[in-house]
Amino acid sequence: MTADLVFAVLGRQQGSGVLVAPGTVLTSAHVLAGAHSAMVVAPGQDPTRLRVVWSDDTLDAALLQGDTGGTPAPPLGTVITARPIPGCEIIGYPRIQRYDGRKPDLDQYTGTVLPMAGLLRRTLTVELDHPPVTADEDGPSPLAGLSGAPVFAGEKLLGIVRAVPRGRGHQRLECVSLTAVLADDEARQWLPAVTVATTGAHPRDDFYEEEYGEALGAAYRRTKIFGLDELGKRASEWDLDTAYLSLEATSRDREAVPAPRRIDDLLAARPRVLLRGDAGAGKTTLMWWLAAHAAAGTLGPELAELNGLVPFVVPLRSLRARGNGFPSPAELPGVAGLMIDTAPEGWAGRVLAAGRGLLLVDGLDEVTQGDREDAHAWLSGLLARYPATRCVATVRPHAVAADWLGAEDFEELTLLPLRGDDIQAFVAAWHQAARLDAGSGENLADLEHDLAQQFRHNPNLADLARTPLLCAVICALHRQREGFLPENRWELYDSALRMLLGARDERRRIDAPDGIRMTVEEHTQLLQRLAAWLVRVGQTEFTREQAEQRLERDLPGMPRVREQGSTTEILTHLVNRSGLLQERTDEVFQFAHRTFQDFLAAKEFVEDDVLPELLRHAHDQQWHDVLLLAAGHCKRRDLPVLVAGLLEAGSATRKRDLKTTLYVLAALAAQHAAWLDDSLRWRVQRAVKSVVPPRNPEQVTQLARLGEYVLPLLPGPQEASKDNMDMITGLISAIGGTTALPYARAFAEAGEAHRFASNWDTFPPEAFAREVLIHLQDQDLVSAYGSRQLRFLRELPHLKQVLVMGDLPADEIVEALGNRPLRHLSIAINGRLDTLDLLSSLDCSQLRGLLVSNCPLITRLDAIGELRNLRLLTLGNVRDTDGTLDLTPLHGLPEALAIMVSGVPAKSLLGAAALGDRLTVK
């Protein structure tokens, strides 16, 4: 707290005062004794005369206004606890502190606010920690001149000193609370812009919270960008403000329009979220970004309500590595390993109890299957104790059952694979980072352009880049190989590892770094043994001690490496030079990504001839990636063993979802075979066919991994039952592309075109419109996402029910919909449209239904008031900049109109009463 906030006030007597707003000083009324102005003096400044604008003798408080030098005012606080508040400060100009016999000087006191003392008299009472001086009970108080001095709890101003009651040894002060001053309507008129924060019993919390936010920023504002580490620390560590890409996700629950949306938008209205995503999909990056920006208060308008919350990051993989249990509230600040002192006792509990916590639980899949129920019990218990806490938890797609946290009111979101524009945006950002330290002879602009073109024209390559991690791997390999790229996922990982383990130092002509020289194969042998151990024990992080114990076991078989250094030196070399290990926190390490750990572990299991051990874990989802990656390492003798073992594991389970997953893994593994016995190929096909058609969305997701392989196994439109029709057409749409188009056309010609109407984005848009959507009936709803699909709506003039999504301008929408007499129109997820005036340019004479959802610039409903035949109006997250929505333009519409509003509180709806029971608010 700076001395610039506190003034000596020279009225009828000398007192003190404090800045409460720009140019406004609060002091005691008895210091002024009825004067209309007073001189104020701040340290190092000339006296300034301020005028009295408000005074209340009963409260003993007054406000002065004038030029106070532009110093910002402190935050104001109101006491919300009955408990004593220790560690408070009083700063002012007491008589005892004068120098040269007459000049006032600042003095500082510490004490405890006693909220219950003086409660009946509405007095804020402070007990000083120590008596100021020994004084004569009959003489003036040594604290005379302190009247009007501020009382601070942390940085918050609670009130001003009013009097020193006698008989207390000058150790107790009576004060005027800010709450009492601001309750006076006239005083409040002079303080229109101030905001008041609540103050609990622990003022040290404010200081610690500020330090905690800075520590979060230091820990989570930067991320490693794969493939850039050879450029040095400056380029390989990327600021998340630059690196963060808001990914697309879908919701399983209450979206009015079930369509891909940016994850920021979906998180905004959901207090508790279980976020599913594949390895490398960006789950951890999102958690880091949320933690850093929520703590700094710099999240954008979609997530503004998270600003100021206190993030608690719980990386479950780290807890496993350290052997710790699930954290209690008091342990939450420490589990992320931040560089910060221990929190004040009870601080985290107070934050959570106040509803100011943001719990970020990363990696529910990274605890063992047996521990997941303990994780569930811990999380549900914590949130039951602190129900106002917001929470985001991450997990791989199939690690836990659907609605696993449903009883705790979690809603589920699923991160979607990168596609189209997002891949191009990532490519541009990756190359921008690479330019930070690129050599003068390297033409990154040409490389970027070439890769962007390859992604546009090669669907198979784009399919490999489905996650940020894989996209980064492709960027790095494309750069190293000057444009030549692997053709499948396994070759992609293998090439990336070779790049990291050998090519980097060779390219930079670094010989024997750290005094140790190791070949690519020697690096690989040590790392794959470490990776296999981590998979076996169900961990992704490990301590230095654990790693050295593993190396002690492995180095006897590698005498050339062992003689070059100690176990500690070899581990240091692996961390420094491999590019695959990184120190997550002090003395805790992990692989650069879980995918590389699984890839190397799979290599070890195959080379160590322990496929039976691997197959014993086929029922554990954590081992599925290892099983699949093992197929790429298998030789001709081993691959049939792996494929047959997966088939046997699938046939042994009665759980249809797991059976489907294992049969899909067997089929994917079989695809690695250059040669496979016909009988085994037939067994694989028969197994997959036995779980076709899928019965639920989980099975659709799994079977879609097989792509065009599964399409001929599906029943045709004549054989399919009505009960399975949704899942069959959903699988065709999930596979999508040119190969799935004839299957979609066959179902469309059989009268099932409506089942594809919302999946336009997975097929070639022009061919899909002409071969599938042309078969839609007049009453069917068609969805168009983006400009390309919108253009082809003109070829479907018979369709009267249309959903248009994306940032589409009004003129494009009007041109595409033409003069067709619309029956139902939905406009959703449009951040460009700022009015609904386009309705006047469309044929809405027969319009019965209108939906407007997630269009943040649309704030007025005037254009809807002209739709006389409208019978159903749905409005989702439509509001004015002040949070209100004016419904009065709807008052003149027919009585038969039903109106549904979501995303706007009932209290923020203007004109709602006149609509009566026609209005439903969700």
Image: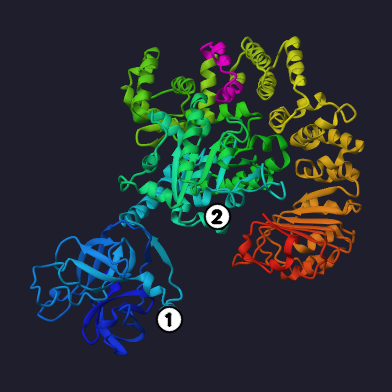
Residue 223: x percent and y percent?
Answer: 47, 43
What mark, if any, has residue 186 been given in the picture? 1
Residue 217, x across and y down, in percent: 42, 50
Q: Quadrant of the N terminus?
A: bottom left
Magenta span main SS: helix
Disc 2 residue type (three-letter): Leu
**Amino acid type assigned to the residue bearing label 1 in the image:** Glu
Q: Residue at x 29, y 89 (%)?
A: 34
**Which residue does the numbered mark 2 point to in the structure image?**
303
Crowd rating for badge 1 (residues with CA inside 10 Å; few <14, some 14–19, many 20+): some
Callout 1: SS: helix
Indicate whether 748 appears above or below 294: above
Image quadrant in which you'd find residue 179: bottom left
Left or right: where 669 falls relative to 315: right
The residue under the point 42% across, 66% down is: 196
Q: Is residue 431 magenta?
A: no
Identify which residue is drawn at 56% across, 18% down: 617
* Nearest to the observer: residue 536 or residue 439: 536
Where are the magenta residues, as a range? 607-629
Viewer-side residue, 738 vs 855: 855
Residue 843: quarter of image: bottom right
